[in-house]
Amino acid sequence: MRTESLHILSLFLYALVMIFISFLTINPLILFSILICEVAVLIYFNKRERIVSTIKVFLPLLILTVFINLIFVNAGIVVLFKVFNKYITLENLIYSFLFAVKLLIIIYLFYVIEIFVDSDAAVSFFSSKMPKTTLLFMVCFKLIPTMKNKLKDLRDIYKVRGVEFNSKSRFQRIKAQIPLIVVLIEESLEASFDISESAYIRGFLSGKRTTFNKSKFKHIDYFVSMLSIISIFSFLIFKRLTDYNVYDDYRLPINLFTFSVCILVFLLTFVINYYYKENVYAD
């Protein structure tokens, strides 16, 4: 059973710091610092299969990013080769690779947050602060996988009844999908009524609700929050000094300010990971 070691707000602030920095920079040193932290956390928690499965998705995404960038951007000085009257430059390849790395960082970040954040604690906290918004998000997140599973069951049922979904005629394939869509819409409406009745019976929005487990901000939460805020402000203050424009100069921007942001990223991740492990496995 997971033990909540950090407040949900401090963990979400950490996630916002990583997203904020990764979106606003293309500095390779900073991006790979965030990526290394995420991969280290996943390895530490024995999530190697997620690393491998995500890389399988990342490789085609990288190829697609490079292809699109090569079509629309024709910049750079160091020419590597020429394809279909298009010059392939080193700067173009580096930019495409770093852009794909950004997407990989976001994917891994969601895996890391899934490890650190207790879903019950998150729902409990945000339900007490934003009940309507929390309920809306819960219904939306549940809708897609529920409809996907239901669609699979319906297709199996209709196949048994003789409905052909793989007909050569496009019109027949579209026509075969209509009963499935009608049933899905009908069941979605019924589910919405069930949710509203259940919420009404449980006194949703009838008044201030009590909670069994009220999370409190501890000293470590204040420390993590302050460290997150320092990381964001340090990045913004030094952003001009850590900016990296690959088309101007593809060499790495090695300076003290870049290393300071990288160190803050490593330190923030280490503190959260260390404290989490200490609380989970402590007697």
Image (cartoon, rainbow, N blue to C red):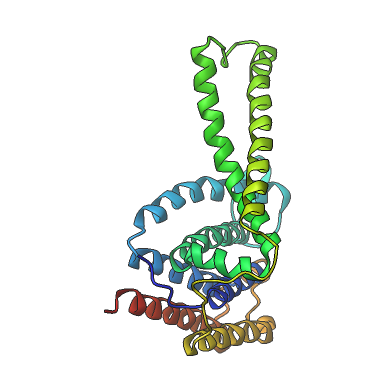
Image quadrant where one finds the C terminus: bottom left
Task: Give the answer, above or below, for where 258 lies relative to 16.
Answer: below
Residue 105 at x, y = what percent? 53, 63
Location of residue 237 by image quarter: bottom right
Is 82 in front, or is 30?
Answer: 30
Q: Residue at x 32, y 61 (%)?
A: 46
Is 279 in front, or is 254?
Answer: 279
Task: Give the answer, above or below, for where 253 lies relative to 40.
Answer: below
Number of residue marks: 0
On the question of residue 187 being in view, the answer is yes
Image quadrant where one finds the N terminus: bottom left
Left/right placement of residue 264 relative to residue 196 reads left
Left/right placement of residue 275 relative to residue 78 reads left
Left/right placement of residue 54 relative to residue 254 reads left
Q: Residue at x 49, y 60 (%)?
A: 108
Task: Give the answer, above or below, for where 37 lies relative to 199.
Answer: below
Q: Residue at x 65, y 56 (%)?
A: 135
On the question of residue 88 being in view, the answer is no
Is 112 in front, or is 32?
Answer: 112
Residue 219 at x, y = what percent? 49, 90
Residue 26 at x, y = what percent? 62, 69
Is 76 in front, or is 209?
Answer: 209
